[in-house]
Amino acid sequence: MRDNPAHITPYRIAIVTLDSHNARPCERALANMCVDYPGLEVDIFAAATWSDNPNEFDKAKEAIERADLIVANLLFLEEHVKPLLPVIEARRDHCDAVVGIICDAALVKQTRMGSLDMHAPESGTMALLKRLRGSSKPSTETGEKKMRMLRRLPKILKYIPGKAQDLRAWFLCMQYWLGGTDENIEAMLRFLISRYAGVSEWRGGTVPSPIEYPDVGLYHPDLADRITVDADELPVVENPIGRVGLLLMRSYVLSGDTAHYDAVIREFEKKNIQVVPAFAGGLDGRPAIDGFFVQNGISNIDAMVSLSGFSLVGGPAYNNTDAAVETLKNLDIPYIAAHPLEFQTLSQWSNSRGGLGPIETTMLIALPELDGATNPTVFAGRHGDGGGCNGCHFNCVAQEKRAMAPCYERIEALVDRSRKLVLLKKSECASRKVAIVLFGFPPNAGAAGTAAYLDVFQSLHNTMKAMALAGYNLE
């Protein structure tokens, strides 16, 4: 009997995802579930830690090799997918279920949930999935539209009997995960156990449906529910010097991993700047921009700061630069990209001579820069097992190793730069000082302004004439 501690066989669930922000909801879910499911073990692993801590991958591999149920999520990078794929392949036929959601196609194909086998030759269930999904060509749909479709599909599939119910279960798992509050994560685990666990007495039962939260909304730590869709409910800064829109990750807001966002909000308000902290699902910032940063087709903020760490339209798997550029052109305000560290701890970064690694440089710096972002700034990270960070005078002490922690020194710099850009945006052109830097290589060889195929000095002359017409003071 499983209620006899002397004879309990562990039932193991292994979850592998990109980062650690869902770790604490999983830990809290396990604490609530252990009475109902004696012997249940839930381990969650963040692939972002593997490059600097190879032992973390070894732990994930060991957990998967003995797991009864496997969940893989938000894994797109080759350095994560390549080592993980053979481990899951070797285990998938020897466990109760494998769930691959919102990740590389090779990992999604490992999904095996009852009659749903995404690795098998096309079946009636997979044909149904393709019809529901639509074209396999690159989609121009916004994240907002995709989230609406995700909520709609389980409601449609509910009335299709037989094998379609396992396909519905796959979509529901995605919905539970994307709604990543404690309640939804716990419900997802209970749902998977009730349908697929090899322990007969755990099967069946009623599990709450996914709790739906706004795909697009506003966050503030002082709000009663922390989330709203009404901008008038945000705390008001008296006589602000300007308004700054903040782009947040919805998943961090729902999971409660928001200490880094709270610190940024507090620092802006301390500098007498009104903030509008908005989030959107689907890794597409445009719905949040359209909903809260634009009024009657005109920007109602003086600057925008992205705290997501991703490009404006797209995430770790892709980015739509053309769409981002069009959005930023219409806003016509300064755009700053700040990023939390996911692939190393704050202490590792502060003590490193190299700073960001190659993947971080691409994801956090290069892709947002293609959109038009400036002033890339680290503003947060995790402490891990290091106990804290001594990279600056704050000497921060770790509170929770898996929770996102603010880097106060960098946040002060971020807010100060943003404040200066706000003041610059609101200033008269004639009062601004502009420096123009000309290409000149090799140095001291009369090569200034000799870039190939460019009439540099004529272009400079035309630029200065346009600036004079715009109100700049040229002598």
Image (spheres, rainbow, N blue to C red):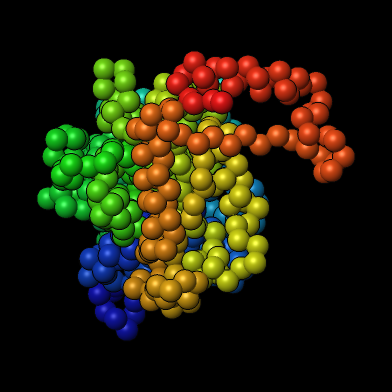
Residue at the right extreme of this rendering: 445
Q: Residue at x 36, y 45 (%)?
A: 419
Q: In the image, is residue 280 above or below residue 265?
A: above
Q: Nearer the viewer, residue 425 or 18?
A: 425
Instruction: Give the number of marks.
Output: 0
Image coords of residue 338 (percent x, y): 46, 48
Dividing the image into 4 quarters, which one contains the C terminus?
top right
Q: Is residue 353 left or right of residue 393?
A: right
Image coords of residue 450 (percent x, y): 81, 29
Image coords of residue 6 (percent x, y): 32, 84
Q: Is residue 169 left or right of residue 269?
A: right
Image coords of residue 453 (percent x, y): 80, 21
Q: Quadrant of residue 125?
A: top left
Q: Nearer the viewer, residue 91 or 21?
A: 21
Q: Residue at x 43, y 56 (%)?
A: 413
**Residue 170 shows in the view:** no
Q: In the image, is residue 336 above or below residue 98?
A: above
Dividing the image into 4 quarters, which one contains the N terminus?
bottom left
Q: Residue at x 78, y 37 (%)?
A: 440
